[in-house]
Image: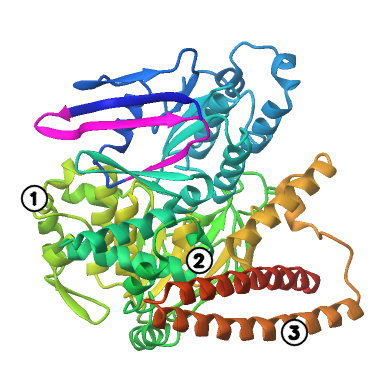
Amino acid sequence: MAHLLGGESLAISFGTRTVLDGVTVGLNEGDRIGIVGRNGDGKSTLMRLLAQRLTPDAGRVTWRRGVNVGYLDQGDVLDGDLTVGAAIVGDRADYEWASNPTIRDIMGGLVADVDWHAQVHSLSGGQKRRVALAKLLIEPHDVIMLDEPTNHLDVEGVAWLARHLKTRWRPTEGAFLVVTHDRWFLDEVCNDTWEVHDGIVEPFEGGYAAYVLARAERDRMAAVVEGKRANLVKKELAWLRRGAPARTSKPKFRIEAANALISDVPEPRDTVALSKMATARLGKDVIDLEDVTLAYDGGDPHAKPLLDGITLRLAPGERVGLVGVNGAGKSTLLRLLSGDIAPTSGRVKRGKTVVPAVLSQDVRELDDVADLRVIEVIQREKQTFTVGSKELTAGQLVEQLGFTNEKQWTRVSELSGGERRRLQLLRLLVGEPNVLMLDEPTNDLDTDTLAAVEDVLDGWPGTLVVVSHDRYLLERVTDHQLALLGDGKLRDLPGGVEQYLALREAALAAAEALPGQSPQDAEAAPAAPGRSEAEKREARKELSRIERQLGKLAAQEEKLHAQMAASAEDFVRLGDLNAQLNELHGQKDELELAWLEASEVLE
């Protein structure tokens, strides 16, 4: 593969802190590389150096002659006074770009619902991000560098971007670097991972799942003393092996070592025990929305309500993920649940023992403690805190979420965006709420911190509602997902995020087939004529048959995991068992797809 660009012996410091020290890396055609590491360790700095947007203190960056590099900034750098069209295509005539099918696909995937003549400053954060991506992607770059491209994108936008990057070039052509905290995205698009830590860059083969497995092996081989971090890695590894084992097919190192690492790691959550604790704290009633409608008509009596006739009953210890297009009303639904706003009609019923807490997107709640130090903020709330069966001091809890002894004495006003989110989450938890609502909690957090947050949430026994575009987080900390599809209705997603994306894709296709109809209208409209009773009876039989088969496969899967744990020293046996497990997962995927198809007949 031809070399595109690289850095040799790169070193850079900011003040007295050395961020990168003697780093040598290269990018070849066909490389699809994700950059991970803790906040502040130098991920964006490395990418800016390679893009020649920053000059190193030592070393040099070289590009192959004629290489074309495109760069997506983490922040908003578009000219707010330009129209959307001018920001994307400049002064080019429509026929110059509209005749290109690739550009048309990019426009349709990113900015189809954005007003072409609107000024950029009038757009939402998600719309600005999509405009910036469209501006970058329509150009014929050899190398693309993306700094947090999924920020402000909804689940649908992230899925589209992943598909585009996977098909943009042939496998041996082009290259990209991406800095992101979105672990599903890393797994979906990357074939290599660079970890930036302690001034160096360490390469790993594969996406995020492979990186977690390889890092766990590295820690095991090196007998790392860093116990707390290694325990989090082990827990993340256990989730990947048990919850999404298909993701672990890329690593090349010894599988038996990985299985030995997790043989003593319990399931992420003891669902039964947490449910009992939640019931004891909450009683039978939590929060019920009954036929709730919320209308923002702006004086237009014919305007559609934002939320229309929604009924939702939260149970003690329930863990719900909420997805939907930008502007569908996800944050508004959280505000209804928390009592910040009242519905236009319908009833909101709260249990007498409910103590809600909301992590908002902008964490302005910390403004009133800006002059305090991190540890003082937590100690002012509470001195000790129980996580699962463990009792931690405020200092121990703060350290568990990544605040070192030095950072604990930093003033809140000096914290980064990710550190502020961590602190506000801690502040909410030490207030001992029993209903926790998180609005885009992954913003500005690195992958290590996300694993730490998930670890804390695993032992938290209350009711949890999470709004997020981070598919990995939703699958990891919630037990089922719901969708607001933009028509004011709330829909259950037994098939998870994949079902949501399929529904959106079908709605968009229907909207294209019916000019003048919005995707939201298409989602609200029947997808097909009413099913006959005979079809419904057959569908019920099929569902019953599939569910029995899925139950048998679940038992077989559990048995295989037990056999793999017992065969950690027998590599040949372990390979055979792993092959059986992969075959079983293939059968399971086919059955789940059939289940979804049958369930749609009954809707």
Q: Earlier in the sequence, mark 1 or mark 3?
A: 1
The prevailing secondary structure element of the residues shown in magenta is strand
The residue located at (61%, 38%) in the rendering is 164
Q: Earlier in the sequence, mark 1 or mark 2?
A: 2
Horizontal side of 466 relative to 25 (left or right) equals right
Read off the residue under disc 1: 406
- Secondary structure of the residue carrying numbered label 1: loop
Q: Is residue 334 visible?
A: no
**Amino acid identity at mark 1:** Glu
Read off the residue under disc 2: 244
- Secondary structure of the residue carrying numbered label 3: helix
- Secondary structure of the residue carrying numbered label 2: loop
In the image, 234 versus 454, the foreground residue is: 234
Magenta stretch holds residue 24? yes
Q: Which label sits in the foreground, 1 or 2?
A: 2
Image height of 384 relative to 389, above or below: above
